[in-house]
Image (spheres, rainbow, N blue to C red):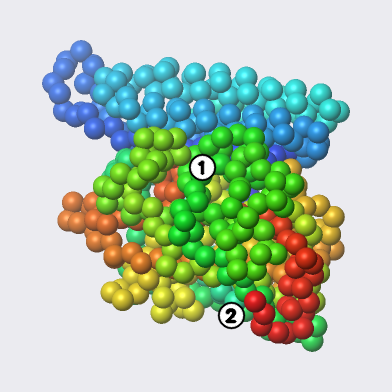
Amino acid sequence: MGRNDRKRRTPLATKAIAASAALALGGGGLLWAQMNASAHESNSSGQNQTKAAAAQVATIACPDVGQQLTNVPQKARQGVATELANLDKQITEAYARLASTRQAQANDASFVQNAIVGPLKEKRAATIDRIRIDIQRVGGSVNAAALKQLAACTTQNATNTTTAGRGGGKNNGGGQNNGGQNTAAPSASASASAPAANNGGQAGNGPTAADFVDITKVANNVLAKPQNQAQASTGSFTTKCGVNANKNHNTDNVIVAPGVTNGAHHEHDYVGNQKVNAFSTNDSLLAAPSSCQNQSDLSAYYWPVVRVQDGSQEFDANALGGGKEGNVGKILTPAQAQIKYVGSPASKVVAMPQFLRIITGDAKTLTNGLANANAHWSCTGFENKVQLTEQYPICPQGSQVVRTFAFQSCWDGVNIDSANHRTHVAFADPASGVCGNGFKAIPQLTMRLVYNIAPPTIQADGTVKNAYAVDGFPEQLHKASTDHDDFISVTKNNLAAKIANCVNSGKKCQ
């Protein structure tokens, strides 16, 4: 696949918004709550039937507005980004209400529709209309009628809360295949065969037993890398930036939600550039200190933290993005964090442009399906055999949990970002390593994060002892497939060219 934006689209998405635009990771959500009321009360008036209907696991699926828009004019992007962040906030607030009103839902089968889904639609409609106004105000075109249809959310039951079968697609064109960290075959991930009986997790929004698998029981699924061609760039450049031992965290995302505090709704680890937040600018990034040994590397490398749900009260236990939004437990500092740039098996590379922004993976796979998923979980000793996208591994004693990422390695040659933060970069063809559509090969950023985690155990009652999970939007239920990584290229002293030259020359540099 030449571009990483080819994903399964709904009929509405296909016909709807041909000339409007989107910011990836914005506006969609899936809400879930476990209804605990008994459905066995005796009542001849019919109220017992009402309680029985309400006493189920309920979900609310909202169209991902950001994924439906494709061409936001530059002058409208800040306003649209702010409104997409408002949609995210509305969904998290609705999720909190859904999770905190279980008794009311058990007593009234219409409660979710009347008190949560209906008001949510009204809020979304107003916000979506502001997006339309922002685009049209600067001369952009938008299908207003189709955009308006994205306001409504629908209720679903628990059978639709697994990522498997929800609009899944190929894993970003086999994105990791070229990065020295071979990817799993798209169909080989050890998916849960059925949803768990409840949400699980200390905060009630996952993970559940079905989100874990004993890696020793998973068949080998790693695909071979493309063979190097005559013009292959076989070198590598390693930058040592630490493991975030200084605990530089925040819940912002300056790429997706610039100017919006808590735009990510989950904590990030930051290495490299040490002054990254919602209000960072290119100039402020250039003036910031770096955790990298090579002080010419001011790039921002950041990813959602991993937590062990052991009952610990972290610094953010009562804060947005933390405990207030379902991200609970002890934040783990990686034991290792390797950041390496590698070449292309098909061609030489060009230097990354200054301030290039790349997001790999999708923080909302439970809503959006797996088309843009790029999560890879494994264990030391198994990385060349098994990579998991939809489950967390239970590693054998003495083995460590590993997260790996290989970013998009093809660039359109013009833009440092795009409206949806995806279409200016792409993955190379997984079989040949060739960049399609006239894109240029750039050094491929790869990351390998290693964690010391005691193996989780599944209890007889289906609960998970020592569960761990990646931070995420609360409505995404801490699914393993929501793992993602973010990057802004910021360098001094011609470092970008030095990285490209090293990769092209076949040397191993640092």
In the image, farthest residue toward the top? 45
Disc 1 marks a residue whose amino acid type is: Thr
Determine which residue is flagged by label 2: 224
Identify the element where label 1 is drawn: loop
* Residue 341 visible in the current orientation: yes
The residue positioned 63% from the left and 50% from the top of the image is 8
Identify the element where label 2 is drawn: loop
Location of residue 11 in the rendering, given as x and y in whole percent from the top left corner: 66, 40
| In front of the other: 263 or 95 | 263
Give the number of the mark in front: 1 or 2: 1
The residue positioned 63% from the left and 43% from the top of the image is 254
The residue positioned 70% from the left and 32% from the top of the image is 80
Label 1 with label 2: CB-CB less than 8 Å:
no
* Residue 66 visible in the current orientation: no
Determine which residue is flagged by label 1: 251
Quarter of the image that includes the N terminus:
bottom right
Location of residue 282 in the rendering, given as x and y in whole percent from the top left corner: 73, 47
Disc 2 marks a residue whose amino acid type is: Ala
| In front of the other: 501 or 27 | 501
The residues bearing labels 1 and 2 have C-alpha atoms spaced at a distance of 37 Å
